[in-house]
Image (tube, coloured by chain):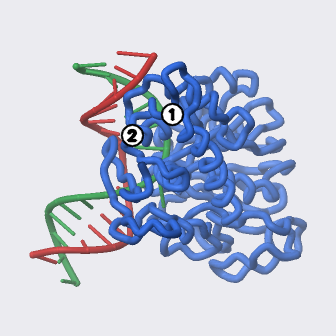
Chain colours: A blue, B red, C green
Amino acid sequence: MPELPEVETVKRGLEPVLAGRRLVRVEQRRPDLRFPLPERFAERLACRVVTALDRRAKYMLWHLDSGETLIVHLGMSGRFTITPHAAGSRSVAPRTPRQGRVPGPTSDGIPEGQALGQFMYVTGATAAHDHVVFHTEDGATVTYNDPRRFGFMLLVPGTELDTHPLMRGLGIEPLGNGLNAVYLAMRAHGRKADLKAFLLDQRIVAGLGNIYVSEALHRAGISPHRAAGCLAKSEGRPTGRCERLIPAIRDVLIAAIEAGGSSLRDYRHADGALGDFQHQFLVYDRDGEPCQRAGCGGMVRRTIQAGRSTFHCTSCQR
DNA sequence: AAAAGCCCCTGGACGC
DNA sequence: TGCGTCCAGGGGCTTT
């Protein structure tokens, strides 16, 4: 699931349930995810108010009134399930959810236009791989489920967030003002690695993953097999490709966020409201299909780069 | 510094 | 139906 648009969607979905709310209890069901959970994890979270939720790259940040920040990474298969409050109590979660379905952005309290993907509103029992359960003062529960356990949670003092090893080396946010052709050309200048690998490097642009790199390069009409250095001229100034790539990255991420992210594989059979953007993929997972660019007539091919699948049109991506 | 490879883990899809 | 194989959104770590 989780590249930048999916993490952003999860953050937006959790905000109305968590932001400004007190956690009354936290259940830790196992000692570790990818890494050991923090010492006294449940204790340090219990009775704390989540003052705000934030996102940096693919990390979700829960700021707490204790001054600590919970860093959450969803890994490959991490997801959150929201179980609303008991009927009648005060909450912004959907009032009468149908089993396994989200009523949709309605008057139930989810703001109009709010992305609802990646979530499942149920009143079910504990499921396999439910590793951490957060109970809020409103009676809602937020359950973290992660079959592969590539995700992790860390607690760090807010003052040390920016210098934390996971945060310190991160590149710029692709949706911020920092992503521009001059920056990207400067970082790409002289690089021999494939463009695909370059764009996956979180130290360059923070938040892109395997899907959206393929989609962005298709939109920009650039082959993922080119050397990253193709973004810069000999003196380090941006090339035309670089100029095209900037809006391509931004546009595909914005479109994906608007669709509530993408849902595939681990989530294919999940009930509930899921992201919708997978239907808008133009190349990802479309090996052998005709290129959808108007007038192209080429074919999408799957190749392997750095051990991972890349999809691109061999005709219009040069 | 940059690049390449390996590893963590579980489950679903597919072929025989 | 059952078993083996391959593959999956990530990223840290080690080796060249």
Tell me: residue A261, above or below residue A248. Answer: below
Q: Chain of mark 1?
A: A
Q: Position of residue B5 (x, y in %)?
A: 25, 35
- The answer for how far apart the CA atoms under marks 1 and 2 are is 9 Å
Q: Nearer the viewer, residue A211 or A122?
A: A211
Residue A231 is tagged as: 1
Tell me: residue A240, above or below residue A300. Answer: above
Residue A66 sits in quarter? top right
Q: Residue, x 46% and y 34% (percent of image)?
A: A230
Q: Residue, x 60% and y 50% (percent of image)?
A: A248
Q: In the drawing, does residue A202 fall left or right of residue A134?
A: left
Residue A226 is tagged as: 2
Residue A58 visible in rendering: no
Q: Chain of mark 2?
A: A
Question: How dense is the environment of label 2, judged by Cα within 10 Å: few (below 14), some, or many (20 and up)?
Answer: some
Tell me: residue A168, above or below residue A150. Answer: above
Cβ–Cβ under 8 Å for marks 1 and 2: no
- Classify mark 2: helix, strand or loop: loop
Q: In the drawing, does residue A182 fall left or right of residue A313?
A: right
Residue A149 visible in rendering: yes
Q: Earlier in the sequence, mark 1 or mark 2?
A: 2
Q: Residue, x 80% and y 41% (percent of image)?
A: A48
- Classify mark 1: helix, strand or loop: helix
